[in-house]
Image (cartoon, helix red, strand yellow):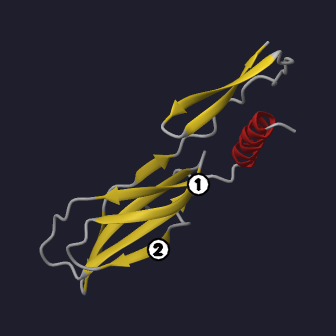
Amino acid sequence: MSKFTRLFALQLLLLMVVSLILATGALAIDRVATWGDNSNNEDGFVFQMCPGTCAPAAGGWKEIARLGPGVRTFTVVSVPEGSVTSYRVGAFNIAGVTFSPVTVDTIPGLPTAPTTITFTPCKTVSVVEIGTGVWQAVCQP
């Protein structure tokens, strides 16, 4: 097996691994939530989530973070692609908690899969530098 054939096979293997990850939905992203601190007497904030589109009085709200006073951001980690989740943040002190309006966050789903791969025999293979130190095998049918 020539050096160029091994390079082409390695690129094809990498493409197959990425395709498998995308096909199984194994990717998730992180989202940073921010809000305005409108109070001057909070002891902290409680950050809650509810799967789907939830009304403020709906069941299913789950506390995912309790934050200190003056904090205005929270990172929600590993949000699955294609999900819909409701979030709210509440300022709390000894008197109770006051919640923000509900925000629904929709994470885009996976794109439509490409068409079927077809292969054409190569008469010649050349290697082209496509970036500094990055090479790609190019097939001439």
Work out whether residue 56 or residue 85 is closer to the camera in this orientation and state it: 85
Name the side, left or right, on which 90 lies relative to 10. left
User: Which percent across, then down, holds residue 49?
Assistant: 48, 64
User: Which percent across, then down, holds residue 42?
Assistant: 20, 78
* Disc sitting over residue 63 in the figure: 2
Name the residue carrying label 1: 28
Mark 1 and mark 2: span between their CA atoms?
A: 20 Å
Tag 2: amino acid: Glu
| Label 2 crowd bin: few (<14), some (14–19), many (20+), radius 10 Å | some
Secondary element type, mark 1? strand
Q: Are marks 1 and 2 in contact (CB under 8 Å)?
A: no
Can you say whether 141 is above or below 75 in the image? Answer: above
Whether residue 96 is visible to the viewer of this picture, yes or no, is no
Residue occupying the point 36% across, 58% down: 33
User: Which percent across, then down, holds residue 55?
Assistant: 46, 55
Residue occupying the point 54% across, 30% down: 130
Tag 1: amino acid: Ala
